[in-house]
Amino acid sequence: MKIILFGPPGAGKGTQAKLLIEKYNIVQISTGDMLRDCVAKGTEIGKKVKSIMEKGELVSDDIIISLISDRISEEDCSNGFILDGFPRTITQAQSLDAMFDEREISIDHVLEIDVDFDLLLGRIEKRASENEEARQDDNSSVLSKRLLVYKEQTMPVLSYYQEMNKLKKINGMLNIEDVFKEILNVVESE
Ligand code: ADP
């Protein structure tokens, strides 16, 4: 099973992705986690992306596309995967289509966790205050930037999948279990 999971920062994407990987025995591919790992290890990529991430801006498409292309070729992806945080631009979405064509695979579900934007800032600030190892980019000024970037660069990607009739909206304002139930309804009904 291959799933793309969309949602703005604070929508609960990572939480739902974890529930899905357990249920279907697939892997989670989070470009945010992969990049944070590169930064923590101080790799060449990590050095390039650190300041961009701290500002809440997007890392260049080239870097992301090559990370994803290598990752989906790995053995553990053969049973399926969830893309979490990718594609975030139209260029990334088109490259993903090309990668899939080349490998003769296709995406099964494209899901959008739909939430009220006005409530997100509060949610993330709460997360940042409760967690001692809060992410560098979880503070209100950077979060506002991440939300803006989502609206400007990633919402067009939703339209891209909508036009292909692939996009399914999930109500992300419910509690964690009920959001997961909605996701399962969609995933199991097709
Ligand atoms: P969010 O909680 O905002 O969804 P992520 O953990 O997915 O955050 O990503 C954190 C940061 O990593 C982003 O703000 C961006 O700088 C970078 N990043 C992650 N995925 C991508 C991507 N697909 N394209 C460009 N930049 C990305």
Image (spheres, grey):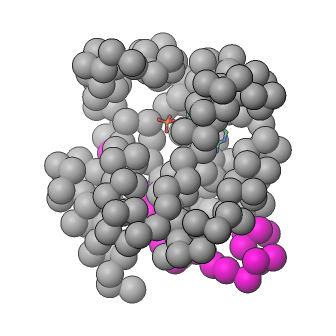
| Residue nearer the viewer, 155 or 131 | 131
- Determine whether, in the image, residue 123 is placed left or right of residue 34: left
Q: Is residue 58 above or below residue 115?
A: above
Q: Position of residue 168 (x, y in %)?
A: 42, 68
Q: Quadrant of residue 120?
A: top left
* 32 magenta-colored: no
Query: Does any portion of residue 22 appear in the rendered image?
Result: yes
Q: Quadrant of the C terminus?
A: bottom left
Q: Quadrant of residue 42?
A: top right
Q: Quadrant of residue 21?
A: bottom left
What residue lies at 25% left-to-right and 66% top-to-bottom?
A: 182
- Determine whether, in the image, residue 123 is placed left or right of residue 161: left
Q: Position of residue 81 (x, y in %)?
A: 53, 65
What residue lies at 49% left-to-right and 56% top-to-bottom?
A: 28
| Residue nearer the viewer, 131 or 51 | 131
- Determine whether, in the image, residue 62 is placed left or right of residue 89: right
Span highlighted in magenta in the image? 97-115
Q: Position of residue 26 (x, y in %)?
A: 46, 67
Q: Regarding ligand 1, which quadrant of the image does it lie in?
A: top right
Q: Is residue 126 above or below residue 115?
A: above
How many numbered circles are shown? 0
What residue lies at 49% left-to-right and 61% top-to-bottom?
A: 27
What residue lies at 78% left-to-right and 41% top-to-bottom?
A: 63
Q: Is residue 129 above or below residue 10?
A: above
Q: Is residue 71 above or below residue 41?
A: below
| Residue nearer the viewer, 100 or 166 | 100
Query: Does any portion of residue 162 appear in the rendered image?
Result: no
Which residue sits furthest bottom?
Answer: 190
* 100 magenta-colored: yes
Q: Position of residue 101 (x, y in %)?
A: 76, 77
